[in-house]
Structure formats: structure tokens, C-alpha cells
């Protein structure tokens, strides 16, 4: 009787298994399809950047190079024309590092202190203060562009790297504060109380109790600042001139100033060079990058 | 005195940042606001002309073009990104092998600058040498894709690039929320015999409502601020076919030396983001306050 029942159920079971197999195929098919679309521009950039120009005109954007070459990369680094000067990206690379490093360090440390002060020691209107800082992360920079240009002019910082460090530090602060506050918010108050019972003041508590456990949020903050400043175009194009331009302004100039036959391979090599630092950071520490991206938008 | 100081040290720590934010965010926005009521051209003047700049802004055909481009761009970008993001989140939620790899692939565009994205897509969609040629070589000889040079369609190419770059964000928000849905609820629905589609439609979807709101607000705010992508990809052209308010503002401030008009357009951009964000920030902080009690 039971054997009969089992036999009777068999086709149904295999039908269910087949349906499940088809379901899995659709799922993986969809995932792979989208993965290919997301990888498409990267493949196009990479392939174009290692092809000689005649091959680009003869083949298509996904054709493999018959004679791969690194010349476009070398040109992008040291001889490509950025506006009227044909000096490649190297100097602009250095500029951007000079801007990124101090702005990232200052904004991250000050943001961490703020976050700590805003969560573990209450003062009147702390939530309103935080709300005003939070909106600073959403402010469209068009609304501050002209006053900042005048201010940089008054301070004698127009067109200088120091001016861009100044701007990026200031507008990075709301972000780093929001990150740190979110993190310290979830740290138990008891930790702070225990330190205070031991007689530790604000800075002692911050330095010896909070900082040691803050590594994850410091990484989030550093990666966020680095990525945003490296990728900045608006401030760079508004406030830096000529050889003081940051990388993205230089890249845009390389692509838009070439006259005559366009060296697409050099354009793509330049784009790759400009993208590599943040891509590398993403591959190494993607988890922290996503955390920064999501903080403020998803709780918990 | 020492005691008083040490009990308030946290306030003194926050004060510099608060002052900085007040000056450089709220102060500067107000400064732009003041400029927008003057007849400033190359240099700021304090000759107040009331709403005249706003009147000329809203009777400027380029401004109208940029606003209507922005509306098309925002609807396309936010709508498609939301759908793609949700679809990817659901696909990734099916106990996938190599989930981490797929996630990494869907999210890497977010780490790349808009200038790089614009440069890459401009080349990939090059009429003649880009996608066109690829499809011809693959045997679709009648395929034609010259949208980037077509004034009526160029704005859609901007949407394509922006969706490619931004949809990962929607995916991440949806996935985080779906993962937060109680596994027991899902299992119960399974046992009740509900199919995959049914489960997502009637069990998960209602729980995703806050995630939809978050994605909507953040991505609309992102769309309004879009500037770099357009500069790198189309430069606002052909003609003004892909011009956006941010570009209008930039051009009139730094190219045409009409600070008053530029300030008026900046204030319009600011107000639209403000209107979007205030309820969002308010409700987030309210929720936090409730949670504390």
C-alpha cells in the first residue's frame, strides 16, 4: 500500500524537481545576464585602452586586441594633452593625493570626536543640532558654489590645492560626523560610565575607550572621504585652475580637448587610470564602502 | 570652573563643527539667496531688484529646457533603478552560490566617478564605432543606435549610464531590508504553499514600503544634483537636449558672469532638495527619539 503510494507520487515529485531546476536556471540566468551588463563598460574601457587606433576603427568595442599595446597607458600617464599642455595625468594624480590625504584625515578625526560628543554626552537640542548637520550631507553644492568662490578669493586660496583641501574638509565633516554618530549610538553607555567612574575625562574616555573600538567606522569614514574627493568634479572645476586641477577635471579635459582624430585608446586608458584608486579601494574594502553608502538611509 | 568646563567639554567639541556647518552650509545658502534678489553680474552687487531674477529665470527657455530634461531624467533614472534594484535583490536572496561575487559586480560602479562613467558610456554608445558596430559584427546588420547624437533621445542615454551606476544602491537597500524580514514568516508562507512570486508580492512587498521610500528620496535627490555625468557624457548637448539645472547654474555663474540669475537657479535647486529631505530627516529623527523612550 505504502509502496504503491510512493510510486504514485513519483512523477509529481520529479515534476516538482524539474520545476525547481527551471526556477534555479532562471535565477542564475538573470544574475549572470545582469552581471555581464554591469561588466560591459569596464570591458569596453579595458579592451579599447590596449588596442592601437587602426584596430579600434576596424574592429568593434568588444573585439579582442590582435596586437595588445601598453602605449595608450604610457601616453595617458605622461604625454596626453590636458588642454594646451601635453603632460599626461601624472601631475594631476599627485595633486589629487595632496588634496585627499589631509582632508580625509582631518574630517575623519573631527567627525569621530563629534559623533562621540553627540551620543555619549547629552546636551540640549542635540537632536536638532544633529538634524542640521545631517542635512549638510544632502545640500546641493550649487547653492554654496558662488559664496565659496568669493570666500576662497578673499582668503587668497583661489585656484590652489590648499583651497580644495579646505573645501573638501568642510563639506566632508557632516558625512564623517553622521557616520561616527551612528556608530557610537550603538556602543553601550556603560562603557563610558565605567571610564568616568575611573576618573577619565572626555578626551581620555575618547582616546582610550572609544578609539580602540572605532576601527570599523574610521575605515568607513576614510574610504568615503577618499572616494568622494577623488571622484569630485564640481569643486575641482569651479575652484582649481590649470596645473592645480584634480584628476577628474584633467580626465574630462583630456577627453574633450583632443582635436582631429580622437585617440579613443588614450581616452580609455586615462579613464582607467583615474578609476583605479577607488576601484582598488572598493575591491579591498567593499564592505566598508557599502556601509558608508547605506548609513543614514538604512537603520541597524 | 574646571568642573563646569569638564561637564561641558562635549559641547565645546561639537561647537566648531556646528559653527562651520552654520557658516558654510546655511550661511552660504543664505548668501546665495541674497544674491538672487540682486542684479549681480560679474561681481556681487547689493542693488536689490526683488524677484526680477526669478522672473527672468522662469521666462528663460534654456532654464525651461533644463527643468523638463531633469524631469524626464529623474523619472527614468529613479523608476528603472528601483525596478532593476528590486529584481536584483530578489534574485540575490535565493540562496545563491557566489552571492558575494555577484554583489561585488553590481555595486562596483558606485565606486567609480561620474566622469569616468560618462567617458566610458560616451565611447560605448558612439554612433558608428560603439554599440552600433558591435551589433553589426554580431550579425544584427540593421541595428542602429545613435541616441547620444539625437536631440530627442540623448537624454535616454544619460538615463542608461545613470541607471548602470546607481541601481546597485537600490539593490543594496532592498537586499538589506529583505534580509531583515523574519525567516519564519517566509517559511510559513512556503508551507502554506505560496509560490515564490506570491511570497514576494504579498508577504515581502508590503514590508519593503519604507525601503521604497528611502530609495525614492535618496535617488531623486541624487538625480537633481546630477552634473558630472552630463558634463562628461553629453556636455548638455546636442544643443541643450540634455542640459540640466545644475549645468545652467554653473554656466551662468562661471561662464556667462550672471551671478544673480545663477544664484536664483541655485536657490531653485536647493529648495527642491530641501522640500524632499526635510520630511525624511524629520521622520528619521522622530523615530529615533521614540525608540529611546
Image: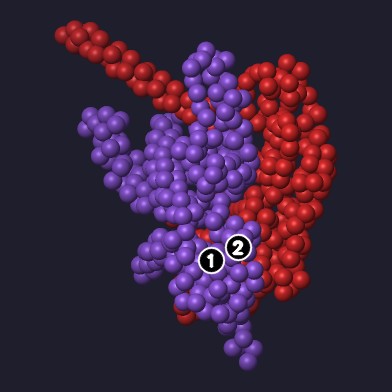
| Separation of marks 2 and 1 at Cα, in angstroms | 8 Å
Badge 2: chain ID? B
Q: Which chain is purple?
A: B
Say which quadrant the C terminus of chain B sits in. bottom left
Badge 1: chain ID? B
The kind of secondary structure element at disc 2 is helix
Judge the density around disc 2: few (<14), some (14-19), many (≥20) Cα neighbours within 10 Å.
Answer: many
Residue under label 2, please give it: B253
Image-based side of A157 in relation to B86, left or right: right
Say which quadrant the N terminus of chain B sits in. bottom right
Location of residue A20 in the rendering, given as x and y in whole percent from the top left corner:
34, 20
Query: Toward which corner of the image does residue B113 lie, by quadrant?
Result: top right
Q: Nearer the viewer, residue B274 or B178?
A: B274
Query: Toward which corner of the image does residue A39 lie, by quadrant?
Result: top right
Residue placed furthest toward the left = A1
Q: Which numbered tag is attached to residue A68?
A: none
Q: Are marks 2 and 1 in contact (CB under 8 Å)?
A: no
Location of residue A100 in the rendering, given as x and y in whole percent from the top left corner:
72, 56
Answer above or below: position of A297 versus B238. Answer: below
Q: Are marks 2 and 1 on the same chain?
A: yes
**Residue at position x 27%, y 29% in the image:** B195
Residue under label 1, please give it: B261
Q: Which chain is red?
A: A
How is the rendered protein coloured?
by chain
Q: Nearer the viewer, residue A249 or A70?
A: A249
Q: Nearer the viewer, residue A273 or B77?
A: B77
Amino acid at each position: 500500500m505504502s509502496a504503491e503510494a510512493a510510486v504514485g507520487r513519483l512523477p509529481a515529485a520529479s515534476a516538482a524537481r524539474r520545476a525547481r531546476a527551471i526556477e534555479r536556471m532562471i535565477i542564475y540566468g538573470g544574475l549572470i545576464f545582469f552581471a555581464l551588463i554591469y561588466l560591459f563598460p569596464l570591458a569596453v574601457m579595458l579592451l579599447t585602452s590596449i588596442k592601437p587606433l587602426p584596430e579600434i576603427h576596424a574592429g568593434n568595442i568588444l573585439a579582442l586586441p590582435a596586437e595588445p599595446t601598453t602605449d595608450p597607458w604610457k601616453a595617458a600617464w605622461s604625454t596626453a594633452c590636458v588642454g594646451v599642455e601635453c603632460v599626461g595625468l601624472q601631475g594631476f594624480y599627485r595633486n589629487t593625493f595632496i588634496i585627499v590625504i589631509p582632508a580625509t584625515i582631518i574630517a575623519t578625526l573631527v567627525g569621530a570626536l563629534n559623533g562621540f560628543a553627540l551620543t555619549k554626552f547629552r546636551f540640549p537640542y542635540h537632536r536638532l543640532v544633529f538634524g542640521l548637520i545631517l542635512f549638510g550631507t544632502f545640500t546641493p553644492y550649487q547653492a554654496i558654489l558662488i559664496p565659496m568662490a568669493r570666500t576662497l578669493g578673499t582668503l587668497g586660496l583661489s585656484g590652489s590645492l590648499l583651497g580644495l583641501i579646505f573645501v573638501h574638509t568642510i563639506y566632508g565633516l557632516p558625512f564623517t560626523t553622521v557616520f561616527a554618530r551612528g556608530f557610537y549610538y550603538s556602543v553601550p553607555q556603560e562603557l563610558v560610565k565605567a571610564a568616568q567612574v575611573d576618573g577619565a575625562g572626555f578626551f581620555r574616555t575618547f582616546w582610550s575607550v572609544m578609539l580602540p573600538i572605532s576601527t570599523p567606522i574610521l575605515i568607513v569614514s576614510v574610504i568615503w572621504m577618499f572616494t568622494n574627493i577623488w571622484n569630485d568634479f564640481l569643486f575641482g572645476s569651479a575652484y582649481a585652475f590649470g596645473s592645480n586641477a584634480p584628476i577628474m577635471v584633467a580626465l574630462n579635459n583630456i577627453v574633450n580637448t583632443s582635436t582631429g582624430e580622437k585617440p579613443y585608446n588614450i581616452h580609455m586608458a586615462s579613464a582607467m587610470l583615474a578609476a583605479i584608486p577607488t576601484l582598488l579601494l572598493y575591491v579591498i574594502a567593499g564592505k566598508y564602502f557599502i556601509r558608508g553608502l547605506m548609513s543614514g538611509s538604512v537603520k541597524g | 570652573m574646571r568642573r563646569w568646563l569638564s561637564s561641558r567639554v562635549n559641547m565645546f567639541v561639537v561647537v566648531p563643527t556646528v559653527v562651520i556647518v552654520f557658516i558654510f552650509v546655511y550661511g552660504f545658502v543664505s548668501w546665495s539667496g541674497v544674491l538672487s534678489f540682486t542684479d549681480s553680474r560679474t561681481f556681487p552687487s547689493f542693488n536689490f531688484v526683488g524677484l526680477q531674477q526669478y522672473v527672468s529665470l522662469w521666462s528663460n527657455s534654456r532654464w525651461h529646457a533644463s527643468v523638463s530634461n531633469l524631469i524626464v531624467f529623474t523619472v527614468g533614472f529613479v523608476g528603472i533603478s528601483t525596478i532593476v534594484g528590486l529584481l536584483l535583490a530578489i534574485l540575490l536572496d535565493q540562496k545563491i552560490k557566489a552571492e558575494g561575487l555577484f554583489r561585488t559586480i553590481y555595486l562596483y560602479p558606485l565606486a567609480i566617478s561620474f566622469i569616468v562613467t560618462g567617458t566610458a558610456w560616451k565611447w560605448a554608445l558612439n554612433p558608428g564605432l560603439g554599440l552600433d558596430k558591435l551589433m553589426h559584427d554580431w550579425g544584427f546588420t540593421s541595428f542602429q543606435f545613435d541616441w547620444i547624437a539625437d536631440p530627442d533621445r540623448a537624454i535616454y542615454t544619460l538615463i542608461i549610464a545613470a541607471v548602470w551606476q546607481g541601481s546597485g544602491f537600490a539593490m543594496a537597500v532592498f537586499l538589506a531590508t529583505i534580509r531583515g524580514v523574519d525567516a519564519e514568516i517566509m517559511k510559513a508562507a512556503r508551507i502554506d504553499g505560496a509560490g515564490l512570486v506570491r511570497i514576494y508580492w504579498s508577504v515581502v512587498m508590503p514590508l519593503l514600503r519604507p525601503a521604497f521610500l528611502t530609495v525614492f528620496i535618496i535617488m531623486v535627490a541624487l538625480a537633481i544634483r546630477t552634473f558630472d555625468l552630463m558634463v562628461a557624457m553629453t556636455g548638455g548637448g546636442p544643443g541643450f537636449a540634455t542640459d540640466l539645472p545644475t549645468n545652467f547654474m554653473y554656466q551662468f555663474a562661471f561662464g556667462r558672469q550672471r551671478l544673480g540669475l545663477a544664484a536664483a537657479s541655485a536657490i531653485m535647486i536647493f529648495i527642491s532638495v530641501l522640500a524632499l529631505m526635510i520630511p525624511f530627516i524629520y521622520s528619521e529623527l522622530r523615530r529615533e527619539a521614540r525608540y529611546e523612550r
